[in-house]
Amino acid sequence: AQGYPDLIGVIASYVSKKIREKQIFVIKDTHWYWPSTRVSRVLWPVYLYLIKKADIIIVPGKASYVFWIRNGIDRSRISIVHYYWLESTMKECRSIPVYLAKIRERSDVLILYLGRLIKKRGVDILIRAFDKVRKEHPNATLIIAGTGPDEKYFKELARSLDLKNIMFLGPVKEDKKQCIYMISDLFVYVPVKTTIPEEWPIPPLEAIKSGVIPIVSDIVGSVPDLKPYVITVPEGDID
């Protein structure tokens, strides 16, 4: 029940439960915050009422578990299921493509971002941070894989900083995704705070599965679950 269209489904399920009393009312929920948009503030009482009526609430991690306990839900009705770990399964990389192998060969340090190219994901922060990294590691390379509405903005930023060691790969085919992780030394995913913060993003999980250390900003909802396996940095901090 992550978004407002899903709320209609939750209401329908609740009504069905009332009509047929033997049914179990289960809600799968990802919230570890409540968004501060105008619509969300109006819908909060409705959503909280429905959550309290659920027989079982399935959440993906500790942050969501704590959030609902703080909002008065009995912990015996909340189950943590790390279902995003299953969703982060990728096609096996059987051989590294030649163009990726060449990038790896000429890079002392290879840093990767893979995901949508939107400002919320902090890609501009990563680019500015890489501008500092290259002063100590001139042969470092930053791969930015994916596409999105702010792709042109990020390319212009890299150009203005004269960063020649940034490669924009564009959209990545599923059978090549794991290959890109496997050649990388670090994976960076540093979203910034907006009215709707990050929940449990899949790319850091994909990186962990590929043996790559993720660096994530401290506002990512999955941080409490991934703490032994990730490096966390303050949100919005280029240094």
Image (cartoon, rainbow, N blue to C red):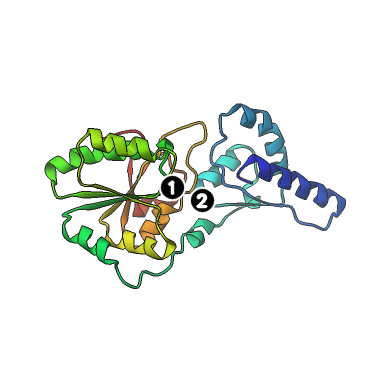
Measuring from the top left, give residue 81's x and y in whole percent: 55, 57
**Side of 24 where 123 appears, left or right:** left
- Residue type at mark 2? Gly
Please tell me whether residue 3 is drawn above or below residue 204 in the rendered image: above
Q: Position of residue 197 (x, y in %)?
A: 49, 37
- At mark 2, the secondary structure is loop
Query: Which one is in front, 79 or 4?
Result: 4
Residue type at tag 1:
Pro
**Marks 2/1: CA distance?**
8 Å
Q: Is residue 231 at all visible to an observer of this figure?
A: yes
Whether residue 234 is visible here, answered yes or no, is no
The answer to the question of whether label 2 and label 1 lie on touching residues, with beta carbons closer than 8 A, is yes
Looking at the picture, does residue 42 appear above or below residue 181?
A: above
Q: Which mark is residue 15?
A: none
Q: Nearer the viewer, residue 237 or 81?
A: 237
Where is residue 142? Give x, y as percent: 25, 48
Q: How many tags in the picture?
A: 2
Residue drawn at x 51%, y 60% as measured from the top left: 87
- Is 221 left or right of 69, judged from the image as shown? left
Q: Residue at x 22, y 58 (%)?
A: 103
Name the residue tied to disc 1. 224
- Mark 2 sits on what residue? 61
